[in-house]
Amino acid sequence: MALDFASELQELRATMASVREVSDLDALRAQISDLEQQSIAPDLWDDQEHAQQVTSKLSRSNAELERIEGMDARIEDLEVLVEMGQEEDDAETMAEAERELRSLRKAVGELEVKTLLSGEYDKREAVVTIRAGAGGVDAADFAEMLLRMYLRWAERHQYPTKVMDTSYAEEAGLKSATFEVNVPYAYGNLSVEAGTHRLVRISPFDNQGRRQTSFAAVEVVPLIEGTDHIDIPENELKIDVFRSSGPGGQSVNTTDSAVRMTHLPTGTVVSMQNEKSQIQNRAAALRVMQSRLLLLKRAEEAAAKKELAGDVKASWGDQMRSYVLHPYQMVKDLRTEHEVGNTSAVFDGDIDGFMEAGIRWKIGSAREQD
């Protein structure tokens, strides 16, 4: 059956109209202009951290504008290509047009996902915590594999990240790790990753080569902003200090600079050890604590609190995604049915397909409940 290019082009244009409306290109251009003025200020690099934020934000904003405007240009070019192919009845040109159409569908679909991210916190940066669950040393190793997967995903998109805390397991891998993804919409994208992840493989830690199932929990919360006003009375916080440690329990810091912060009313615990000083770790821990309590504050019931904060058991019965390395190779999301056979690519950060399917599933589920 021949492709109806006219209908396909019309659909692509309609989708891009929605993308432009949500993206507010006039506001984006104004933001770029303001950032450009800030970037040429003679005293910009007096504050290196602020300067890096300005230049990074300018680069991302320019890339977003170019991506949207470039998509419009590609649709126009495709229309010209189709007209040429049809007028000259050129099969090779029409085959090229079909390939470009497939590519455009994928690219426009990825942009469309952003139009679906309209939740209260979707525009926020994100704080992600990964915890090893059931499965012993394999679970700890799996937690480290997931940390690398998400950091590689961010790296692929040139998103800045900051690992805030790593708690190493005794034999291998991680007990837990916390990191930030510092770009707009990081929470909206990563929120669908919250839940229990399951790994099935031949254990590299079993000298009999038996198959092992292990679990890890992923929690995603939005990073707080200055306007959130989450006040935590000091008498509600218990703060312990200890020495940072590296793999295998080796000390990487000879001073008590690491901080463990507990919010007594809710039992929420945050550990930070990757900053250089106790003061910095305490500030980082407080920011993550506020981010978690921000969600808890909006939840009316304990069950809703657990769902929002991604409080999962990391064991049988509540997994949302399976990573199977034996007896076959497949990663499958159990909510969306999205699956990929190239497990190496997934663990190397190629997870946009899972996120897009997850966002569409999440929006669809919310609409069904309304």
Image (tube, grey):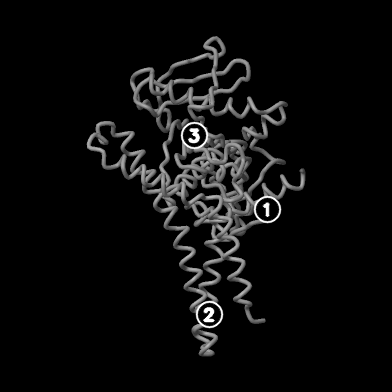
Three-letter residue code for mark 3: Ala
Three-letter residue code for mark 2: Val
Foreground residue, 239 or 211? 239
Element carrying mark 3: strand
Number of residues whose C-alpha sits closer than 10 Å to that of mark 1, classed few (under 14), some (14–19) or many (20 or more) = some
Disc assigned to residue 177: 3
Q: Is residue 159 left or right of residue 132?
A: left
Question: Between marks 2 and 3, how big is the CA–CA gap?
Answer: 51 Å
Mark 2 or 3, closer to the camera: 2
Q: In which quarter of the image is the N terminus?
A: bottom right
Question: Which residue is labeled 1 in the image?
Answer: 336
Is mark 1 in CB contact (under 8 Å) with mark 2?
A: no
Q: Position of residue 16 (x, y in %)?
A: 55, 60
Residue at 62 percent across and 66 percent down: it is 11
Q: Where is residue 44 in the image (x, y as percent from the top left)?
A: 27, 36
Mark 1 or 3, closer to the camera: 1
Q: Position of residue 68 (x, y in %)?
A: 47, 58
Q: In which quarter of the image is the C terminus?
A: top right
Question: Between marks 1 and 2, how big is the CA–CA gap?
Answer: 34 Å
Disc assigned to residue 82: 2
Q: In this view, does 336 lie above or below 304?
A: below
Q: Locate residue 35: give its quadrant.
A: top left
